[in-house]
Amino acid sequence: MGATKTTRKPPEWLLGWERLLVNRAQPYAVQQEDGSYRWVKESCTLDLLREHLAGRVTLALSSLDEAGGAHWACLDADAPESLGALVHLHAALAAMGWPGIVEASRRGGHLWLFCADVVPAALLSRALRGVLGRLEHQGLRLPKLEVYPDKENRLGHAVRLPLGVHRKTGRRYPLLDADGLPLRFASRPAAVRYVLALPRIPLHFLRASWEMPVVSLPAPSPRPGATRSPIIRWVDAEISPLDLLAEMAPDSAMQRVGQGYLGFCPLHDDAAPQNDGSPGRPSFYAVQHRTYGWSWRCLSTNCHFNDGPMKHSFRLFCELHHCSAREGIQLARRRWPQLGEE
Ligand SMILES: [Zn+2]
């Protein structure tokens, strides 16, 4: 390999690169001259990572650690001409809170997504499938993709690390900016520092994006009768639960699912892990009906708001303020001064 052992303290960028990409020290894979990979049952050292960046060896690393965790996901589009679609996907994911970076490859590209913490691969891949499904549902044309990690335990599929040289073509494929144009760096460490400074996906965001549970969703209920306070009627008619949650309980992270929206319930603790240790499931459901307007309920049987008919916005306003309907009317007047006196 020709690597010289150094006794100096390794540079921070190289240590950061190792923390970012190395899920498990061994084995690692080495790309062969024909483009294939061979596992090596030894530890991937800092010297090897440096040799990869220098282009003298090309490494691919497992997309999983020994315990089924992952630091990153990689979406591999390797159909010819798929790079443009991958750049669009990158922009769409970033807009949904999934930042990453695209690296061109021999035929298409890799879209790298980095996690702020080590996360269970099962959570990462389900959340990713969920968000890709939603984008497709919204009409985005996805390129044909391999998604890594593709397993939940044992040795993960090896993915070629960024910024190296493809052994078969001898080329070093660039990282791309948001417009799909190659990024240029003064040095390899500068490129590494750029990648290290990219935003990473936080764990709570993955939980919120967890593939939505299959549930039979309740029907919307009619607007409350005309006998109630005009303030209550106005809030029910004009204010959406989504806006109330965005203002008073943003952690609910409401996301479109089917006809309605689902997120973490602010009225009980459903972000807490389940008894079996799996991540909490979003269970607060809100839906807008053409005739009936907005209504909501919690789908968790642990929750006080699971039973009975669908509820409306004013009730949510009061629950989020922990107040009675009478107090809620006063608060609503202050919150929406256009309401005037009842
Ligand atoms: Zn609830």
Image (spheres, grey):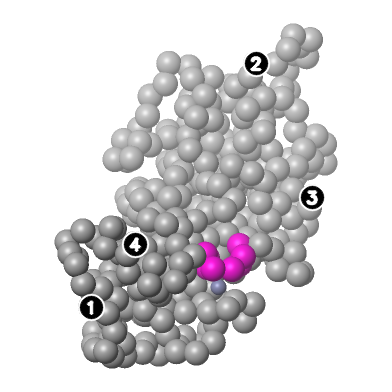
Q: Amino acid at mark 3?
A: Glu
Identify the residue position indicated by label 2 in the image.
11
Secondary structure found at label 3:
loop
Q: Residue at x 29, y 40 (%)?
A: 179
Residue 168 position, x and y percent, is 54, 39
Q: Is residue 292 visible?
A: yes
Tell which of 320 and 39 is nearer to you.
320
Check the picture and name the quadrant holding the C terminus: bottom left
89 is within the stretch colored magenta: no
Badge 4 crowding class, 10 Å Cα cut-off, few under 14, some 14 to 19, many 20 or more, is: some
Q: Residue at x 45, y 89 (%)?
A: 309
Instruction: Check whether the beta carbons of the residues at disc 1 and disc 4 lie within 8 A of each other.
Output: no
Furthest toward the top, the residue is 8
Identify the residue position indicated by label 4 in the image.
331
149 on left or right of 307: right
For marks 2 and 3, the one nearer the N-term is 2
Splitting the image into 4 quarters, where does residue 318 fall? Answer: bottom left
Q: Nearer the viewer, mark 2 or mark 1?
A: 1
Q: Amino acid at mark 1?
A: Pro
Q: Amino acid at mark 4?
A: Leu
For marks 2 and 4, the one nearer the N-term is 2
As measured in the structure, the alpha-carbon distance from the residue carrying label 1 to the one carrying label 4 is: 14 Å
Q: Which span is picked out in magenta?
A: 261-271
For marks 1 and 4, the one nearer the N-term is 1
Identify the residue position indicated by label 3 in the image.
66
For marks 3 and 4, the one nearer the N-term is 3
